[in-house]
Amino acid sequence: MNGAGRDPAANAPLLEVTGLRVHFTRRTGFFGARRETVRAVDGVSLAVGRRDTLGLVGESGCGKTTLARAVLRLIEPTAGDVRFDGTNVLGLAPRPMRAMRRRMQIVFQDPWTSLNPRMTIGAAVREGLEIHRLAAGAEADRRVRQLLEEVGLPDDAVRRYPHEFSGGQRQRAGIARALAVKPDLIVCDEPVSALDVSVQAQILNLFADLQARRGLSYLFISHDLAVVRHLAPRVAVMYLGKIVEEGPVERILVSPRHPYTQALLSAVPVPDPETKRPRIVLAGDPPSPANPPPGCPFHPRCPHPGVDARCRSEPPSLRAFGEAAAACHKAES
Amino acid sequence: MSEAPLLELRDLRVTYTGPDGTARAVDGVDLVVGAGETVGLVGESGCGKSVTALAILRLVEPDGHVGLGSSVRLEGRDLLALPLKELRHVRGNHVALIFQEPGAALNPVLTVGAQIAETVREHQKVSKSDAWARTVEMLTLVGIPEPEVRARHYAHQLSGGMRQRVLIAMALACKPRLLIADEPTTALDVTIQAEILELLADLQRRLGMAVLLITHNLGVVAGHTRRTAVMYAGQIVEEATTGELFARPAHPYTEGLLAAVPRLGERRERLAAIPGQVPPATAWPTGCRFHPRCPYAWDKCRGEMPPLLDLAPGHKARCWLVQEPVRRTERGPGRTAAPPHGT
């Protein structure tokens, strides 16, 4: 943002994903005689700015976790382009890729399974430092203590094991582990969904503090728009492997254009018994990404009264509406 | 209320003894649920909400120990004194329980229909074909499309929302008077959460069943319960009609829980978080158990445990602020309750 006059690349986004596809083939039928393709991520483009946060919202099975992993090359994408700080990540050989991984870290949803139960919190945080040869010996000890303090864990956490901690504290440990290698980007995959609301608020505040202090960028994934809005100035809404709407968070909250975003918004619980908001009920479950419907992927569940033959046959592309964009034939400015 | 309420807990206490000492997980809970009423029980993990639910059906034994002075009355009958055989009849027939993890609660090697039919035959004398008919009827009731087909599916073939619907169908198959729903939507997406809550409300109206809804999220309780009890450290700390609780939260813990709910309506730089965490049940703090996390706490709070004090008819709070409200304005700068109306 404040890179004016310096390197022109400083104004370019830190992470730029273009046309990303992740398709899995699986065998089905009698003795796996048939093959089918699951289009988990089907042509996604997005960008995360420096010191910025992009929120990625969608329901279970929409492909958001696959997208997160493909961006970090934990899964090899089928097609598309991932640029991190100007470098084509997908073209990197294993050794430079490892160096690149230091700069892009991930925090997972489930603090109960993402930490090794037989490793102390101290050892878990220290591991990254050693793998990337950032510190050793007493220096590593000092850094680990500093990191634990930074994420709000007590001193003695160094020697303790994950099972001795609550969900919120384990998530803090997971964050310390990601921070240890001084990343530029952290992909946060539903990091607060498994936590109590009171603890959720603590962890969201921690993410905000760390960003302010360290200049981090986040790709912040959640199924809850109310959670995302507290961290992300921009959000992208994903449905069945595609981005269906994207734009500034205030814009999306006030005037969502895609019927799916409207339905998602109407489902967020309102902590006020006096408010009776009309809720948009979506019929049925999301269809399978192995067999997506033709045309607009949302049309079989779409509550819009004007769903027509075009919706059923022609896939809508993302159209710009000012600073926002929506993939809906019926969207109007 | 002229006759006995549907469910009445009096001085419910549950202790667990382990290497760290005795955990007083539930420590003197009084709670009443009327016939056909929906009541919310809200608090963070580790506050004793789930243990309260389990103790109602005596599912804490043998690890947990229910206090001698405790009573759990269902339509006047003391469940704690009931012989096991009669208790089994109450479980399922009169009181049903659904849990957070719909995946873990279903048998992976039986079709979901077979499990519901088994439940029906376990509790009621009906033929196999009648049990199957009831199964399909229940799956239809909870809004599962193609119920005859779905009944023949296994749990892994269903989505999380569908599984929770199946569990609700199973819980309701014997038409219980009371459904205890322990975090029924916590593992689900927001859209599915909204659907399940609406389904519960609809079934409650249609079947005249009472619901005890247990959750950590006050936002979930807002539109769906008539009364709400807030639990902290094994005790009820506030109880009121849900409207009153949201409009005038009296306990600082309730205030904190309310402020922590992420909202769409306002952008705040920082969410109001309750500092710290629930202490272990083996070492509840002295005095008011919330005092180490409370922004208003003074000497009295550290030394003396407040009783549940009456604020208004039907509104009680376990907080010395009820007697000395002036201290609220003196302290806790910037910590105000959510506005009662609008967003």
Image (cartoon, coloured by chain):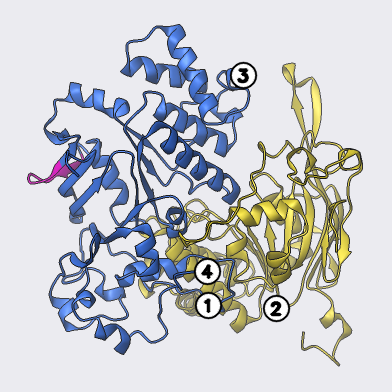
Q: The C terminus of chain A is located in which quarter?
A: bottom right
Residue hosting label 2 = A51
**N-term mark: 3 or 1:** 3
- Please report, as a chain letter, where disc 2 is located: A
Q: Amino acid at mark 4?
A: Gly
Q: Nearer the viewer, mark 4 or mark 1?
A: 4
How many C-alpha atoms fall within 10 Å of the one at disc 2: few (<14), some, or many (≥20)? some
The mark that comes first in sequence, 4 or 1, is: 1
Q: Is residue B67 magenta?
A: yes
Colour chosen for chain B: blue
User: Which element carries disc 1, helix, strand or loop?
Assistant: loop
Judging from the image, what secondary structure is the residue with disc 3 in?
Answer: helix
| Residue range corresponding to the magenta coloring | B63-71
Does residue B223 lie above or below B137 as drawn? below
Tag 2 and tag 1 share a subunit: no
The local secondary structure at tag 2 comes to loop
